[in-house]
């Protein structure tokens, strides 16, 4: 199988100044909402700047992530992922999760579940979830880690609610319509590390993360400056990918399956994957891919929330989605990956 990489950069992805929504007057809020909605409707992904989370907090999260993944495997395994995948908690080693199991899930394509994602991850959930407690590295190894991640979780939750309110307004729904469905904080925050490798390592068809759509409502994603994130371009017959570039202090908003289901395809989930940085020379098998880090906050509706089409005429003109619960939908997909 040949090496895969994006053939273009995602054009027209302007940065949305979300400070205008968070702190501006009604007119500015409307303008920011409009820009966010348009980008998401067009691409399924948008880019935010000034989104109200301190840059120092973002850097701290990346620093702690780097420190964690730099630990010897034995120390990382002290936080090892439990056998059950739902919900995700703790450390998963390279090859443990296979997103290839759900590639093409919605299109009915046969999954390539012989392929692995060349990544390792650490997942955490709501810091006060007693049913599924988080798994942290030893405080002797990384004393600040838990505090930094819990803070980040709360910051991203607060921002998620604002993004959801902005989208509800754009869809002519009451502002709290979506945020009210996320009160139990069933989100998952994931630190990702893609180890360094060469172009040759990917010639068997493995990727850093295989093509997929996210299962939840909205994912907030920060990536370092290495590159490699790619989104499926809309409206092309053969799957075509475009590089999605951002700085660590910019935040990507990625639409997940629940929005597509709720809105009957008005706002569609975007298929994406992580391959090689755009500039990589794929003909040179010895070319080195630097290691890459990212932080994903997967916004998830409360487990009992229904994720069929919203009961209003303008959400029923597209595909009709069965009215199952968010928890059931999540598990259907998740169990194919672990
Ligand atoms: O690492 C990234 O930039 C994307 C990760 C991703 O798509 C995911 O974990 O669902
Ligand atoms: Fe994703």
Image (cartoon, grey):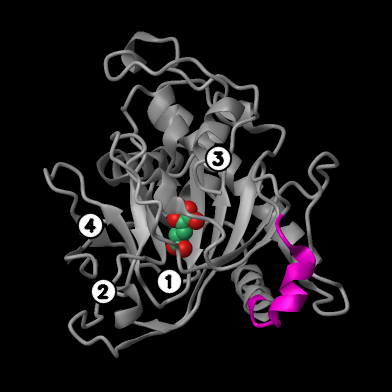
Evaluate if marks 2 and 3 touch, with contact meaning CB atoms under 8 Å apart.
no
**Res. 109 image quadrant:** top left
Q: Which residue is mark 2?
A: 278
Tell whether position 258 is magenta.
Answer: no
Q: CA distance from mark 2 to mark 3?
A: 32 Å
- Residue at the spot of label 1: 247
Q: Secondary structure at mark 4?
A: strand
Left or right position of 81 against 62: right
Q: Residue at x 59, y 48 (%)?
A: 159
Tell me the residue at 59%/38% (across/down). Answer: 300
Q: Does residue 18 appear in this view?
A: no
Above or below residue 132? Residue 321 is: above
Q: Position of residue 75 (x, y in %)?
A: 77, 76
Question: Mark 4 vs mark 3: which is more N-terminal?
Answer: 4
Nearest to N terminus: mark 2 or mark 3:
2
Closest to the observer, 8 or 328: 328
Residue 6: quarter of image: bottom left
Q: Circle 4 is placed at which residue position?
A: 241
Q: CA distance from mark 4 to mark 3?
A: 26 Å
Q: Position of residue 217 (x, y in %)?
A: 50, 37
């Amino acid at each position: 199988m040949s090496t895969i990489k994006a053939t273009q950069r995602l054009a027209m992805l302007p940065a949305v100044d979300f400070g205008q929504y968070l702190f501006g007057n009604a007119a500015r809020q409307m303008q920011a909402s409009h820009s966010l909605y348009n980008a998401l409707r067009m691409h399924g992904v948008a880019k935010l700047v000034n989104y109200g989370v301190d840059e120092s907090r973002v850097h701290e999260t990346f620093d702690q992530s780097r420190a964690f993944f730099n630990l010897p495997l034995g120390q990382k395994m002290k936080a090892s992922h439990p056998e059950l995948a739902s919900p995700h908690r703790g450390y998963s080693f390279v090859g443990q999760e296979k997103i290839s199991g759900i590639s093409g899930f919605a299109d009915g394509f046969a999954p390539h579940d012989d392929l692995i994602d060349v990544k390792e991850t650490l997942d955490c959930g709501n810091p006060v979830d007693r049913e599924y407690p988080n798994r942290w590295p030893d405080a002797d190894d990384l004393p600040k880690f838990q505090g930094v991640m819990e803070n980040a979780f709360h910051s991203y939750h607060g921002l998620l609610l604002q993004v959801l309110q902005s989208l509800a307004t754009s869809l002519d729904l009451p502002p709290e319509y979506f945020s009210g469905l996320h009160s139990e904080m069933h989100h998952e925050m994931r630190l990702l590390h893609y180890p360094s490798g060469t172009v040759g390592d990917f010639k068997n068809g493995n990727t850093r993360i295989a093509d997929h759509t996210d299962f939840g409502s909205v994912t907030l994603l920060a990536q370092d400056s290495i590159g490699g994130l790619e989104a499926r371009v809309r409206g092309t017959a053969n799957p075509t990918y475009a590089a999605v570039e951002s700085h660590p202090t910019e935040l990507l908003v990625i639409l997940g399956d629940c929005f597509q289901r709720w809105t009957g395809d008005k706002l569609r989930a975007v298929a994406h994957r992580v391959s090689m940085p755009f500039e990589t020379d794929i003909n040179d098998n010895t070319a080195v891919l630097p290691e890459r880090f990212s932080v994903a906050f997967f916004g998830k509706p409360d487990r009992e929330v229904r994720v069929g089409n919203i009961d209003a005429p303008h959400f029923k003109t597209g595909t009709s989605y069965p009215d199952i619960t968010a928890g059931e939908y999540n598990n259907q997909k998740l169990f194919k990956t672990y």
